Structure formats: structure tokens, C-alpha cells
Amino acid sequence: MNWGWQELVLSRLGAPELDWVQVEITTRCNALCCYCPRTALGERWSSQDMPVALFRSLLRFLGRTKQIHLQGWGEPLLHPHFFDMVSWCKEKGLMVSTTTNGNMLDADSMKRLVELEVDVIGVSLAGVRPETNDAMRSGTSMAQLVAKMGQLAEMKTQMGRQRPEVHLAYLNVSDSLEDLAILPELAAAMGISKVMISEPSPALTPEVPGRTHDRERKALALREAAYSRIQARSQGLGVDVFWASCLRESAGCGCTENPGAACVVGVEGHVAPCVFCADVLAGTGEARATASLAFGDIRQTSLTRIWNAPEYIRFRTLFSPKTLLGDRRWPAPCLACPQRKADDVREA
């Protein structure tokens, strides 16, 4: 007797209750940012799109998930079925968000984002001035992105829509703290409601010209003090500013990636705690660059089974406040990660 249909029903009923699932629908990109692991891996990078059948099979197990974020190590709007994916997610009642470099945004695609009521669209920058950002993010144009955000705001007004809400994913790789002070005005001018300032990951990104990785976080307090001043000024402009430590504090979690109630499904179906553990970061070929931290593959088993696997449960307990400091043995991808709260540095 084939019990496959019964397992499927039980998997749906027992679907994990998640705040969000991030789905890497493509690893292709039309930019070449100097700090991106895709740039560092070069020919060893695997560029591919998630098959539609695989994406739809995942949706069956998201009945208790609040939000789906369509983006990983690639430009999501390059996927030929991006808008179909948005539509399928909306049919399931999921909040939908994505992050884009803006290159694929035109009048037609922005109209579809508004019509489909995408909840949040994040746009990426790595500089507060065009000359800084464009040098870091080869193949993109800050001036064009600013203009497109103005067009999107006008389009929402004309169509009588509030969504998508626009967020800024800002990677602080090159700006001086003095230059960074104009970030609130820039965000307000772009119609952005939230800014998330992040730090380059020393474990994944190549060295950035003019900046040395703060591997031991010695200068982090100085930068975060500047972020706090920016936050105070931003509130008067209607912009919320977050960064790793304040996000962890407000969420009561030891990691910005919320590993206890969120996960990432990679382009090939591997399930990991976050994008910094993604399988694609290991590269292709015999000399793989890093070890991934995947707990299962949705091509072989359900997300429900993967989430409830003993080894995945043990990993999540590392981030529980009830876990004693001496009992925490961090896997390699977590050791130097700036998204995690620094406590001890023991390796698993």
C-alpha cells in the first residue's frame, strides 16, 4: 500500500510554525558587487534558477508560515516565473517580500509589484553617494535606483495603493561615519520607511578596497554609536533604522536571522538556518570554498520532517537563552558571523 498521500496530509497538518521562510529562487545576478561571495568564487559560482515544481512543492508545507521572502544570493527578478511565484504565495495568504538591486525594475514590473500587493520590496545600496555605491556595486546605478523609487511612489499614489512598502538594505562597507550621517535624508527622499544597516561578513566576502574586516568587532561599538545617532535623526523623518545588535535586542534573539522560527530554502532545495550557511557559498568543483550548514533537502523529504529532525533541533537550542554558555559549540559558519551575538567562540 502506498502511504505517500497520508504522509503528505500529516506533513501539512504538522507544518512548522515559522515567522518567515526565505527562498533562494535564483543565484543568477546582473551585477558584480566587489564584496559579494559570488564575485570571490568567480567560475566556481553556480548560477541557476529554482525549478517551478520545486517551489510549488515547498508551498504545500507553509500553511503555518507568516511570510515568504523571495531572494537569496541572486537577483530575484531575473527568475522567469518571479511574478507567478508571488501570485501563488498570495493565494496561500502569505505575506510576500523580496530584495532587489533595482536593475530589472521598469514601469511594467513596478506596476505588477503594486497590483499583486507585494508587501515589502527591499532595495540594496552600499554607499550614500553615487560614486561610492556604484564603485562597490558594479553594474548598478544609485541615481537610476533613486529615480525608480520616485516612480514607484508616484505609481502607488495613482493606483491608490499603499504597498509595496519600501525598505533599504544598506551594507556599510565604505562610507565614513561622517558620510553615513546623510543616510536618513537619503532614505526619506527615496520613500523608504525602514533601513537595515548590516556589516560585511568576514567569513564570506572578499576584502573590500579601502576597508579592513573588523573580524574581532573591535570597532563595532564606534560604528553602532553612529548608527544610534542616525536612528534618532531618522525618527523625525518617518524612517526606522535598525542594525544587528538593536534588532537582536528588540527580538530577544541571539541572531538577526531568527533561527528558532525561520529558515532558508536554497535554490536546489537545501534547508539551512540562514543565507550565510547556504550550499551555493561552497562553490562548485573539488576545491569547495566553505562548508554549508544544511539540515535536509526538500527534494528528498518534507520541510516538516527537516525542521523536526533531531540535529536541527539541537542547532536551534544553541540560540535559546536557556542554553548555558559552556554548552554552546558553534558550527563554523556561525563563529565569525556579525549577525550573531558575540559570546564565546567555541567551535562544534
Image (cartoon, rainbow, N blue to C red):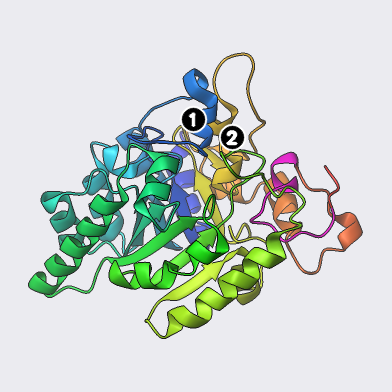
Q: Nearer the viewer, residue 3 or 257?
A: 257
- Residue 347: image x %, image y %? 83, 43
Mark 1 is on which residue type? Thr
Question: Which residues fall within the magenta stretch?
Answer: 332-344
Q: Is 300 placed left or right of 347 in the picture?
A: left
In the rendered image, residue 343 lying in the magenta stretch gets the answer yes
Does dot 2 land on a helix, a strand or a loop?
loop
- Dominant SS of magenta comes to loop
Residue furthest out toward the left: 158
| Residue where numbered disc 1 is placed | 39
The circle on residue 269 is none
Residue furthest out toward the bottom: 236
Mark 2 is on which residue type? Pro
Q: Nearer the viewer, residue 275 or 299?
A: 275
In the rendered image, residue 214 lying in the magenta stretch gets the answer no
Residue at 47%, 54% (x, y): give it. Answer: 21
- Residue 297: image x %, image y %? 54, 35
Residue at 34%, 59% (x, y): give it. Answer: 96
The circle on residue 206 is 2
- Residue 285: image x %, image y %? 57, 15
* Quadrant of the image containing the C terminus: top right
**Vertical side of 147 occupied by 250: above or below:** below
Marks 1/2 in contact by CB < 8 Å: the verdict is yes
**Vertical side of 14 occupied by 28: above or below:** above
